[in-house]
DNA sequence: AACATTTAAGACTAATTTGTCTTAAATATA
DNA sequence: TATATTTAAGACAAATTAGTCTTAAATGTT
């Protein structure tokens, strides 16, 4: 699997929150996200804690509380979420798991992998949440097994 | 992590055996592979069992026994090993883990991911063991944390 | 036949990831 | 102040992956 489940959930949840952000709802309760996307509330809470401790999100307790991004969705790239949850190892480490693999002492696959993992990295670092949510709304794309972006329009 | 540890070990071990194959040593004892590559013998044994039950390798018990490929290393692509151990999910499944994601009901990342995962698939399906071992010998590339291809030349 | 070598198979343990549950702390509102 | 709402934190359990160990079966050698 390319990304851990925690990371996948983080991205899906971020897309949901980004969509809410565009509707002037800065703080979104975690419970709402977990309900809408059919994710475990407590598991998602821990994932959001990773995102907040990475500085990507902020939280607010109490009624009308929830979580929100610390910057606009247009400024948040997917790779920031991946980095916060799974780390950047995928984009830097040897595909055969050899420590210190690099230009100096490469493994036989190093060159090809270095090229492909850069394509991967570019995919995540060139894509913003904003880009995906507006595309998702335009084309009514899916955010979970059940719901699509248009289902989010009214609370 | 892109590939499971079992899959990484399978590829490293396959490269070792391919290198031995070129030295007219068809059946290589698993113990030798695990010693040389510093892998758990029993774990590696189970990995090879996956490769043999996938038809990629054959085994022979008793003295002078071991394991060998069922075809020439030039004809074995990395993706066959990946398929036998990790399956082909990586190259077919949604990066956000949504079931049934595809052209019909795509997730917001689908298009970009479809492109990138094809690059991944091409990397694994266009690379043969033979290609890597000859390149590895030519450039003395690494097969483990400790040893390089040239270390394999004499038993 | 007896013995040594080697893979096969499966039980078992350890580590990691995933998911659940409970309690505490912060905040808003009445 | 009392209460309801919400995140924080951490213990705990379940599932998956990784790794170990033992015994059985097959094969070659003496």
Image: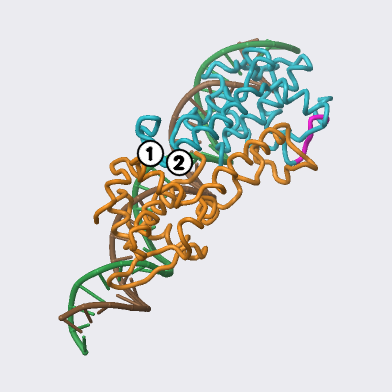
Chain colours: A cyan, B orange, C green, D brown
State the image coordinates of residue A14 (x, y, percent, origin top left). Answer: 66, 25
Residue mark closest to the camera, 2 vs 1: 2
In the rendered image, which quarter is residue A132 located in? top right
Q: Are marks 2 and 1 in contact (CB under 8 Å)?
A: no
Q: Nearer the viewer, residue A136 or A36?
A: A136
State the image coordinates of residue B34 (x, y, percent, origin top left). Answer: 31, 54
Residue C2 to residue A9: above or below: below
Q: Along the horizontal axis of the image, is A130 left or right of B75?
A: right
State the image coordinates of residue A51 (x, y, percent, origin top left). Answer: 56, 22
Dot placed on the residue nearer the N-terminal end, 2 or 1: 1
Q: Main secondary structure of the magenta part?
A: loop
Q: Nearer the viewer, residue B57 or A129?
A: B57
Task: Tell me the chain of label 1.
Answer: A
Visible in this render: residue A32? yes
For mark 2, give the secondary structure: loop
Q: Which residue position holds label 1?
A: A98
Which of the labelled discs sits on residue A109, or is there none? 2
Magenta residue span: A146-150
For mark 1, give the secondary structure: loop
Task: Tell me the chain of label 2.
Answer: A
Q: Along the horizontal axis of the image, is A133 left or right of A110?
A: right
Q: How far apart are labels 2 and 1 at the CA level?
A: 11 Å
């Amino acid at each position: 699997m390319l990304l851990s489940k925690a990371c996948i959930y983080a991205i899906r949840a971020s897309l949901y929150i980004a969509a809410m952000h565009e509707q002037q709802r800065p703080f979104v309760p975690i419970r709402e996200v977990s309900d809408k996307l059919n994710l475990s509330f407590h598991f998602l809470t821990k994932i959001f804690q990773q995102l907040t401790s990475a500085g990507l999100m902020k939280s607010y307790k109490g009624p009308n509380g929830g979580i929100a991004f610390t910057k606009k969705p247009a400024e948040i790239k997917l790779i920031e979420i991946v980095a916060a949850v799974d780390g950047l190892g995928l984009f830097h480490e040897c595909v055969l798991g050899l420590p210190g693999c690099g230009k100096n002492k490469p493994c036989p696959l190093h060159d090809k992998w270095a090229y492909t993992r850069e394509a991967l990295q570019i995919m995540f670092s060139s894509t913003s949440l904003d880009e995906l949510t507006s595309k998702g709304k335009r084309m009514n794309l899916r955010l979970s097994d059940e719901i699509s972006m248009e289902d989010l329009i009214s609370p």
